[in-house]
Image (cartoon, grey):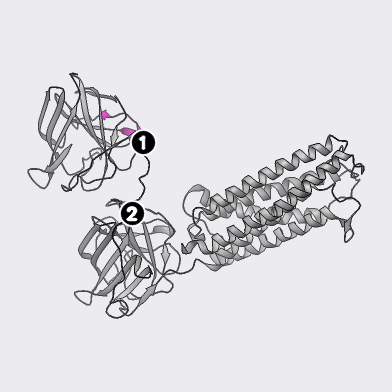
Amino acid sequence: MTWEQGTSDSNVRMTLSGIVGGSQGSYIALGLSKDDKMSDDSVMYCIKEGVYNAYNNDGSKFSQTLTNNNEQAGLSDITATLKDGVLTCSFLRDTAASSNGQQFALDQNYTLFFATGSATPDNIGKHSQAPLISPLAASLQDFSVNIGGPTTQAAVTTPAPVAPTGRLTNDAGCGSAKGCYSKCSGTDCDFVMTWEQGTSDSNVRMTLSGIVGGSQGSYIALGLSKDDKMSDDSVMYCIKEGVYNAYNNDGSKSSQRLSNNNEQAGLSNITATLKDGVLTCSFLRDTAESSNRQQFALDRDYTLFFATGSATPDYIGKHSQAPLISSLAASLQDFSVNIGGSADFPVLVKAHGSLMMVAWIFAASLGIIFARHFKTMWEGSSWFGEKVWFQIHRACMIIAFLATVVAFIIIFVEVGGYSEIEGEGYKEAHPIIGIIVTILTVINPVLAVFRPHPGTKNRPIFNWVHWAVGTAAYILGVISIFFGLTLDKAGAPDYATYILAAFVGWQFLVSILLEIAQCMGRNSGRSNMYEMSDMNGGDASKPPQVAESNFYKQVLIILHVFVVSGFTIALIVVLNIGSDE
């Protein structure tokens, strides 16, 4: 499939050729996809009668020929031949989008699908084999593209970033002739952003450079924030097609490109290059505020956000990792500024997460295990007038209670009250689950204060309610930590969730092994090992099998204390230093 300049700037000459054998009723088709999935795509298919428009409507995997005189709208100068089993069609394709939006404009990158199957002028059948998919997105107005080696759909995965061969170094003029914001290690930088005097007092020359690897659909972006939170911010993002204005509207954590001719308002003299994995954009930016106030004036200090992710000229996707935040606010009209590195993620957020890990990964995990499996251990011994298991359980749960309450207060101070989190549904659930966990954590010790004495008829009811509330708090607490580790503000690396998942697996394994040991004791004559429904504490006799099971349990609990401590320390360390990676 080839494309070249057409008869004017408003069209492109396209040629489709494919081997279809001797079949008279075959087609070859080109699909233009805004993602890498075969749905909601603009399709042009070639048969020996000509070329027609089609569309994968409503997420369908089957293309439907357009009707209402749209089946050949935007197509002209069509030739079609079927010779020696090779079907070839050549035609002019308008670059503009159709009025119904089902014939895509050619001014952005698309993943290309090539398919073949049976068809008539009125109907295009399902492809006879898995479509071939271009390994990268391309613009059909870029005549320098040469894509080889498409993959089948079954083999499509998100391509691994290509290791860049280029290097990005800091600007020697930083802090003197130019203001700079960068993140560098030695002479190598991840990104460099500079600003200097423009062509007049009413504009500033800005340059954004960042390493994006081999991705053709990547962006680097600079956000101007009036605070240190990513909301209601003016954004400029750079892609290989140019520079565009965007805005984080209504507190959204993702940017929306401005419309109504504002996407490049206040920007001029734009150049954009993608070379050896380094994306660079240079442009003049007006210093004045736009009429809609979504392009900020440059006459004040802003906290600077640098982010990267996937984008097209019409859409900027969510950043692929937590944005980097300048350690201080700066004016983009001050050319003596040189900001290096990134601000630490909020200390109180780190403290909140660390305390929750102490509460639920360490203290609650041990407290629940001791209450569930060690009530019959160390009989005849006591600590400070109470059973050993009870004192350990109570100490662990007091730690969990205090850590949870302090963490709850800390995060409310940090965000200034209740704060909704934008993003995926599970992220939005994090503060709600956190509040539920805190309420349950407060309820359970209050219940314990008023617990009935052993031997009374209400004791079993207390046992079950106390267990249910505690178990619910524990499960929700761990789930909340899972969700919290994925939040941008936490700044935790992706592998932190794998460490937490390993902890859950370990906790489950130890619980199963202790249940087996518990069963050994119960089958040996201990009729009630849990005291959930027992009002008196059960028989104190110990058959030999019980002593043996108790030995196993002691070995397991010692091992469990060390392993859980290791998981807790590892997660706290990763949370607090992971954002520097």
**Residue 155's mark?**
1
Whether residue 60 appears in magenta in the rendering, the answer is yes
Estimate the x, y position of residue 303 in percent, counting from the top left.
Answer: 40, 70
Whether residue 465 is situated above or below residue 399 in the rendered picture:
above
Instruction: Find numbered disc 2 in the image and state the secondary structure of the residue it sits on.
Output: loop
Is residue 6 located in the magenta-colored stretch of the structure?
no
> Circle 1: is it few (<14), some (14-19), or many (20+) Cα within 10 Å?
few
Residue ID at (59%, 53%):
481
Looking at the image, residue 296 sits to the left or right of residue 201; the answer is right
Dividing the picture into quadrants, the one containing residue 322 is: bottom left
Q: From where the camera sits, is residue 6 visible?
A: yes
Left/right placement of residue 455 relative to residue 495 reads right
Q: Are marks 2 and 1 in contact (CB under 8 Å)?
A: no
Vertical placement of 281 versus 336: above or below?
above
Label count reads 2
What's the distance in space between the residues labelled 2 and 1, CA to CA?
21 Å
Residue in the picture at 54% in, 49% down: 498
